[in-house]
């Protein structure tokens, strides 16, 4: 949405969790830290999430749910909310993308897009 009232940007940092992975059993654990920044003119509440997770074999899993890690943060203009979560994949490389469903103080619903990001075991990609 290009309306300046509803501008929320999402950034992601990922990390491979070797200590929680079992490569011999095709179990690869990843953590990700998300920062949701409100660059809009109105406060916005993060109501729910929709993730599309694709593993290295092309298998797609969709995850929907309320809030993030049990919270529905209200993010004021110029402020941000950061949280960490994780996922387990059966391949050494995968990707995630999705949207957060937001509710602005004026009652307008809008989506904040989470651009695709890669999850990869170090050294898995050349």
Image: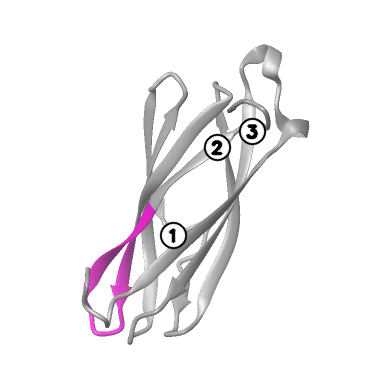
Which residue is drawn at the image coordinates 55% and 37% (left, top)?
119
Across and down, in percent, residue 110 comes to 25, 67
Q: Foreground mark, 2 or 3?
A: 2
Vertical relation: 24 (above or below) 37: above
Across and down, in percent, residue 105 comes to 30, 83
Q: Foreground mark, 1 or 3?
A: 3
Quarter of the image holding residue 5? bottom left
Which residue is drawn at the image coordinates 46% and 84% (left, top)?
78
Q: Residue furthest top?
A: 24
Count of all numbered marks drawn on residues in the image: 3
The colour mode here is: one colour
Which residue is drawn at the image coordinates 38% and 73% (left, top)?
45
Nearer to me, 34 or 71? 34
Q: Residues within 10 Å of mark 3 (few under 14, many from 20)?
A: many
Q: Which mark is residue 119?
A: 2
Which residue is drawn at the image coordinates 22% and 68% (left, top)?
1
Which residue was labeled with disc 3? 29
The C terminus - image quarter: top right
**Left or right: 105, with 31 as reference point:** left
As for residue 108 lying within the magenta part, the answer is: yes
As for residue 82 lying within the magenta part, the answer is: no
Which residue was labeled with disc 1? 67
Secondary-structure class at tag 2:
strand
Which stretch appears magenta? Answer: 101-114
Vertical relation: 96 (above or below) 125: below
Secondary-structure class at tag 1:
loop
């Amino acid at each position: 949405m290009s309306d300046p009232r509803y501008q929320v940007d999402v950034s992601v940092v990922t990390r491979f969790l070797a200590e929680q992975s079992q490569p011999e059993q095709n179990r690869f654990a990843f953590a990700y830290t998300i920062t949701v920044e409100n660059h809009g003119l109105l406060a916005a509440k993060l109501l729910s999430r929709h993730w599309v997770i694709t593993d290295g074999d092309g298998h797609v899993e969709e995850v929907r749910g309320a809030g993030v890690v049990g919270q529905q943060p209200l993010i004021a203009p110029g402020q941000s909310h950061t949280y960490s979560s994780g996922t387990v994949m059966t391949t050494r490389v995968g990707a995630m993308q999705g949207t957060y469903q937001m509710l602005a103080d004026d009652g307008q619903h809008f989506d904040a897009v989470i651009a695709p990001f890669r999850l990869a075991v170090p050294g898995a990609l050349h």
